[in-house]
Image (cartoon, helix red, strand yellow):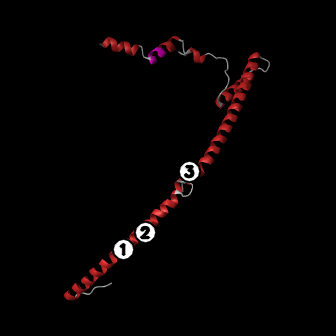
Amino acid sequence: MSGCTNQFAIFKSSTIKLGYRLTGLWPYNPIGSIPADVSTPTTTSRFRRIEKKLDQLDSNSSEFQSTLQKLMKGSQIQAHLASELRRELSATTHAQSIREPRRHTSGKSVRLSGIISSEEVYQMKRQEKKLDDLEALHRLRPQWKKVMKELKKRCIQRGRRLRR
């Protein structure tokens, strides 16, 4: 079992990189360290890197010309992307400006039919509830009067005062 764990310790990536460094073959990843041809910039940081490289190159060299062409192509792509984003943003804000009033009115008053809105329905229900409560009070009034007369008699018999 100990041989197996030693084998895992030997083949860790840090051990392999240390071996390359000690033999002088550093960096271990040669693809990232070899200066590659400049690709078309797609981000602003890549634009800055290419700009620095152009400052270091001779203006008559072919590498300068190809780098400059790629920089121009990247700037055209960025300009196209900016115009597309601007167009999409204006379309989104337009849709949002249309959607916002609709959202505000939908909570307040929605037409159920061509004649009445939901707010008017709520008002009618509240009014009906008030009328039902008043009608119930009017029905209970005669009974309340009878109960009050009886209560007054009992209070007088026991010697208590009843306040109205």
Instruction: Look at mark 2 in the image and give the residue it sits on.
Output: 130
Give the foreground label among 1 and 3.
Answer: 1
Across and down, in percent, residue 77 comes to: 70, 28
Q: Position of residue 84 (x, y in %)?
A: 68, 34
Residue drawn at x 34%, y 78% is: 141
Q: Is residue 115 left or right of residue 82?
A: left
The magenta stretch spans residue 100: no
User: Which image quarter is the N terminus in?
Assistant: top left
Point out residue 72 in the picture as x, y percentages from the top left corner: 74, 26
* SS under mark 2: helix
Q: Marks 2 and 3, Cα distance to the nearest angstrom?
A: 31 Å
Of residues 102 and 75, the one nearer the viewer is 102
Q: Please state the extent of the stretch shown in magenta in the rendering.
A: 13-18
| Residue 151 sits in quarter | bottom left
Query: Which of the 4 image quarters holds residue 71?
Result: top right
The mark nearer the N terminus, 2 or 3, is 3
Residue 31 relative to residue 70: left or right: left
User: Considering the numbered disc 1 on the image, is that residue within a helix, a strand or a loop?
Assistant: helix
Residue at horizontal 38 percent and vertical 16 percent from the top: 9
User: What is the count of numbered marks?
Assistant: 3
Circle on res. 103: 3
